[in-house]
Amino acid sequence: MAIARGYAATDASKPLAPFTFERREPRDDDVVIDIKYCGVCHSDIHQARDEWGNSTFPMVPGHEIVGLVRAVGSKVTKFKIGDRVGVGCFVDSCTTCATRDLDLEQYLPGLVVTYNGVEAGGTPTQGGYSDHIVVKEGYVLSIPENLPLDAAAPLLCAGITLYSPLRHWEAGPGKKVAIVGMGGLGHMGVKLAHAMGAEVTVLSQTLSKKEDGLKLGADHYYATKDPETFTKLAGSFDLIICTVAAEIDWNAYLNLLKIDGDLVLVGIPENPVPVHAFSLVPARRSISGSMIGSIKETQEMLDFCGEHGIASEIEMIEIGQINEAYERVVRSDVRYRFVIDMASLKA
Ligand code: ZN
């Protein structure tokens, strides 16, 4: 056992505070990672505050983890000491059922999430707001050499959350893609869809981030506060990816799709999504959901980002600023992802 230092929520109503805990003794197939940076995902906040009703405490959040390999087990073949690596939203999954070969492990029972989960053997998992982590080789990703480590951290959740549906619904040349919301997820959607060759439109509440959106690769930018947006763009898009968790007029957005268009949810609104059959039936439209991506697809996304020089737009913070950062994420006051510099743990 090695002692790890981090920041934890000790219950849903308390701010995160310094916390010391034990990481498991590395096994033959484990990689020990010195964490350099960890992104701050909105789902960290939901879980630290038990807003999904499934939280266990104490909880060290963080699933946008990047760092350097400190040590490897005797059977590890893909990584060596000093390699630049990442860990995303899960650290183990079902290894027995047949569907394992489909590279869809994120959807299978048996998924072990990076924190607020339980490993085989019953130990709670603890995430990346900490100095190191021990992870099975098969769940460790390589970070391309040309990407800055800090700005690469959010790729591990925000990046793959957008990459997977863009690939699955075949965003590319000749396709019109709309990204709803211009936050941590949305801005990654703009960059990725643009790099895939799609014509990209941002649908945001206001035009306050228009300049950024166009700079990051959007071809068009519309305010959803303006009702004219919905008349002007009716029947325009092949694919709309909704990154917001707000209650929006779903039927109005569905009406922006072409025949056979898809509206894909990656944000998770608290309430049921009311959809009128007339928003779907007369144009054979679909509404779907998508959650992160497999390990194989996550590595493919990282390699794609390496080739295209894509990383996240970040605001670096020290770990002591985490509670203030949470408040700002809740207010959507971040451009566009907070990343914690883990060197600040030692300060
Ligand atoms: Zn996340």
Image (cartoon, grey):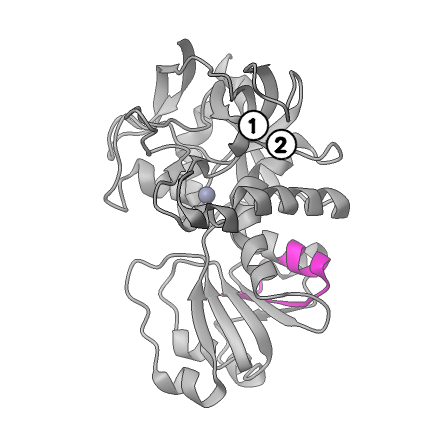
Q: Secondary structure at mark 2?
A: helix
| Residue type for callout 1 | Tyr
Residue 290 visible? The answer is: yes
- Tell me the quadrant of the picture where the N terminus can be found: top left
Is 63 or 120 nearer to us in this picture?
Answer: 120
Q: CA distance from mark 1 to mark 2?
A: 6 Å
Q: Residue at x 31, y 29 (%)?
A: 15
- Whether 96 is among the magenta residues is no
Q: Secondary structure at mark 1?
A: strand
Q: Position of residue 158 (x, y in %)?
A: 53, 47
Quadrant in which residue 156 is drawn: top right
Question: In the rendered structure, which segment of residues is drawn in magenta?
Answer: 190-208
Q: Residue at x 72, y 42 (%)?
A: 306
- Whether 191 is among the magenta residues is yes
Side of 153 relative to 250 (left or right): right
Are the two marked residues, 1 and 2, in contact with CB atoms closer than 8 angstroms?
yes
Is 294 or 215 nearer to us in this picture?
Answer: 294
Quadrant in which residue 275 is drawn: bottom left
Side of 66 relative to 99 (left or right): right
Residue 338's place in the image compared with 223, above or below, is above
Number of residues whose C-alpha sits closer than 10 Å to that of mark 2, classed few (under 14), some (14–19) or many (20 or more): many
Is 288 or 194 nearer to us in this picture?
Answer: 288
Q: Residue at x 49, y 26 (%)?
A: 136
Q: Position of residue 345 (x, y in %)?
A: 48, 17
The residue singled out by tag 2 in the image is 150
Which mark, residue 79? none
Q: Position of residue 182 (x, y in %)?
A: 55, 57
| Residue type for callout 2 | Asp
Residue 40's place in the image compared with 332, above or below, is above
The residue singled out by tag 1 in the image is 37
